[in-house]
Amino acid sequence: MSLPLANLLSVVVDLQCSAWNELVPDAQERCHSAAMAAFDTVGALSVGAEVSVVLANDAFIRSLNKSWRQQDKPTNVLAFPCEELGHSSDAMRLLGDIVIASGVVEREALDEDKDVGHHLAHMVVHGTLHLLGYDHIADDEATRMEAFETKALAVLGIDDPYATHPAKG
């Protein structure tokens, strides 16, 4: 007997910036699909897992980036894993929070000639992989993480985000 998708992974989307409504009208569904694709790609157990995605503006993520990474600038995505992964009193395992900036994601998508919804999905996959313990500090880690991202996005019908894009004329 298979479980409904909703029981496998809980993705809570907090829309803190109304610009996301116009940028990606189906953002909640995309966030869920992208997080699930990341779990499936690395073979992580998603039953009872919860991921929080905050769709914010650049000012909000800039303040987080300054506080947590000492970088006074907005960035596309930040991931905040729970320190005690899997140690909860109930059946739900809160993995952490992913915060994504509307302005940065929109600018990057336009600069790289990508669909904003596809780029959002990439940021959710990237953030989910961080919550699952993957990183890209060392070159070999980056190569591995990028391969997982590419594979997860392919499942969603999204082109390799690391492929070279023709320059805009």
Image (spheres, helix red, strand yellow):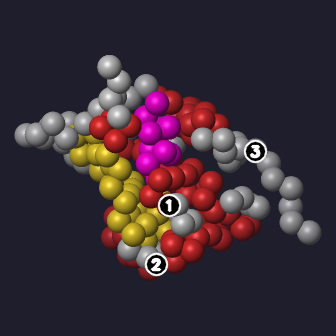
Residue type at tag 3: Ala
Dominant SS type (magenta)? helix
Residue 119 as seen in the image, left or right of residue 96: right
Residue 155 as seen in the image, left or right of residue 101: right
Q: Earlier in the sequence, mark 3 or mark 2?
A: 2
The residue shown at (54%, 66%) is 25
Q: Residue placed farthest to the front in the image?
A: 1
* Front residue of this view, candidates 129 and 157: 157
Residue 119 picture quarter: bottom right
Q: In the rendered image, which quarter contains the C terminus?
A: bottom right
The residue shown at (60%, 35%) is 155
Numbered mark located on residue 163 in the image: 3
Where is residue 152 shown, x and y percent of the image?
56, 37
Identify the element where label 1 is drawn.
helix
Residue type at tag 1: Ala
Numbered mark located on residue 27 in the image: 1
The residue shown at (76%, 61%) is 113
Where is residue 128 shown, x and y percent of the image?
42, 45
Mark closer to the observer (3, 2):
2
